[in-house]
Image: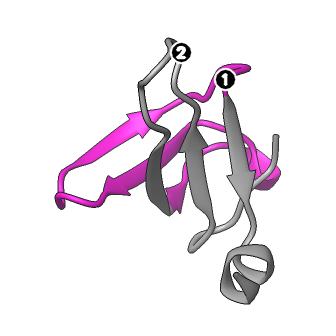
Amino acid sequence: MRASEGDQLVQHGRVVGQHDQVSEIVQVLGPEGNPPYRVRFEDGHEAIMSPGPDCQVRHRETHRQK
């Protein structure tokens, strides 16, 4: 998984009825775009995440077109 600042990190819901959680990658802490990432959630709080298999990176070019 590789990402850049400004990409979105989408964590898919794990149970029926749970919504996806979308955050913005504000800092890439790993080498060459690899995790961990500092992310900012819609409510403004920030966290450092090492995404698992339930996560997906939406690159800036992809989510701007939608």
Q: Position of residue 12 (x, y in %)?
A: 58, 31
Q: In which quarter of the image is residue 56?
A: top right
**Is 44 contained in the magenta span?**
yes
- For discs 2 and 1, the disc positioned in front in the rendered view: 2
At 39% from the left and 37% from the top, the residue drawn is 48
Task: Find the distance from the CA under tag 2 to the CA under tag 1.
Answer: 8 Å
**Is 35 contained in the magenta span?**
yes
At 50% from the left and 16% from the top, the residue drawn is 16
At 50% from the left and 12% from the top, the residue drawn is 15
At 75% from the left and 87% from the top, the residue drawn is 65
Is 7 located above or below residue 29 in the figure? Answer: below
Q: In this view, does 51 lie to the left or right of 58?
A: left
Helix, strand or loop at mark 2 = loop
Is 48 located above or below residue 17 in the figure? Answer: below
Q: Which of marks 2 and 1 is nearer the N terminus?
A: 2
Residue to which mark 1 is pinned: 54
Highlighted range, magenta: 27-54
Question: Residue 7 or 22: which is nearer the viewer?
Answer: 22
Mark 2 neighbour class, 10 Å CA radius: few under 14, some 14 to 19, many 20 or more: few
